Amino acid sequence: MHEKKMNDTCKELRKSVLDMMHYSKSSHIGSCFSIIEILYTLYFEILNTRPANLNDPNRDIFILSKAHASAALYATLAFKGFFPRGWLKRYYIDDGILPGHLDRDAVPGVECSCGSLGHGLPIGLGMAIAKKTKNASGKVFVLLGDGECNEGSVWEAVMFASTRKIDNLVAIIDFNHLQGMGADVIDQANLSERFSAFGWHTEVVDGHSIEALSGALLSGSPGKPLVIIANTVKGKGISFMEGKLEWHYKSPNDQEYEQALRELEKS
């Protein structure tokens, strides 16, 4: 029963994202679909964050560093009651509510304004250090893209986090094997080995398995930050989007929208 509920919720999240991308004629649906199970696992299984405790210093904090996938986070937050689901009809349009990239002052539940890649992990590191300084509980979780890991600021944070033994910091890499211009911008094949070499506890999992994600997110080693390399598929759930670079940029037209909706309904 629980597995069916998980799958049904992920399907509904994808349908919400599909609708948002279609009516707003916006991009990054492939990037959104690759992280649906990750967001579900975090918000429905792991995080202690609730609409009522957003000012609690002991809450878990989540940062979506790959903020071009904001629609996926908005759908998740709406389903968890952080704001009315009706707001999902006002995404990235004139007189809308939900911006294309994340603005913490505009949307309840968004912890960090992000858009320019490479900023989320350094900010999350600072938040995790602040928690330790204040003896506050809760962890800081940061979701990055694999292409985002080309940024030097990411690796500065990686080195500093392990040096300072910031073990309340968790990074999750959406490893969908397609960077903004393809798979061969910078070779990321040994991403897990790089994190391990810099002193992180490293887990490699199926990024579409909620069970595997939950287990990995609850693992770790004292004195070490944790990274989850989540192997995912860009455009997951839609046959003509899966593994296709163009869906980093395209928005579905009417025919594609109807076909995608039919596939989701049958899944």
Image (cartoon, rainbow, N blue to C red):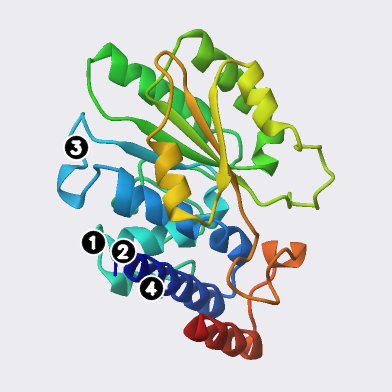
Mark 1 burial class by Cα count in 10 Å: few <14, some 14-19, many 20+: some
Q: Which residue is found at the position 63% from the left and 64% from the top?
A: 30
Name the front one of labels 4 and 1: 4
- For marks 3 and 1 on the same chain, the one whose residue lies earlier in the sequence: 3
Q: Which mark is residue 78?
A: 2
Query: Does 145 sit left or right of 210 as displayed?
Result: right
Mark 3 packing: few (<14 Cα in 10 Å), some, or many (20+)?
Answer: few
Measure how far apart labels 3 and 2 are at the Cα level: 18 Å
> Which residue is located at x 32 percent, y 69 percent?
5
Secondary structure of the residue carrying tag 2 is: helix
Instruction: Tell me which label, 3 or 2, sits earlier in the chain.
Output: 3
Sequence-earlier tag: 2 or 4: 4
Measured Cα–Cα span from mark 2 to mark 4: 16 Å
Judging depth in this view, the residue of 71 and 201 nearest the camera is: 201
Q: Is residue 161 above or below residue 213?
A: above
User: Is the residue under label 2 in contact with that under label 3 (CB below 8 Å)?
Assistant: no
Residue 235 lies, in percent from the top left, at 63, 66
Foreground residue among 231 and 176: 231
Which amino acid, mark 1?
Gly
Q: Residue at x 84, y 45 (%)?
A: 184
Q: Which mark is residue 55?
A: 3
Q: Residues within 10 Å of mark 4 (few under 14, many from 20)?
A: some
Amino acid type assigned to the residue bearing label 4 in the image: Asp
User: Do labels 3 and 1 touch, CB within 8 Å?
Assistant: no
- Distance from label 3 to label 1 (Cα)? 16 Å
Measure the C-alpha gap from mark 4 to mark 1.
17 Å
Q: Is residue 81 left or right of residue 124?
A: left
Closer to the observer: label 2 or label 4? 4
Name the residue tied to disc 1.
81
| Residue 244 located left or right of residue 110 | right
Q: Which mark is residue 8?
A: 4
Along the polypeptide, which appears first: circle 3 or circle 4?
Answer: 4
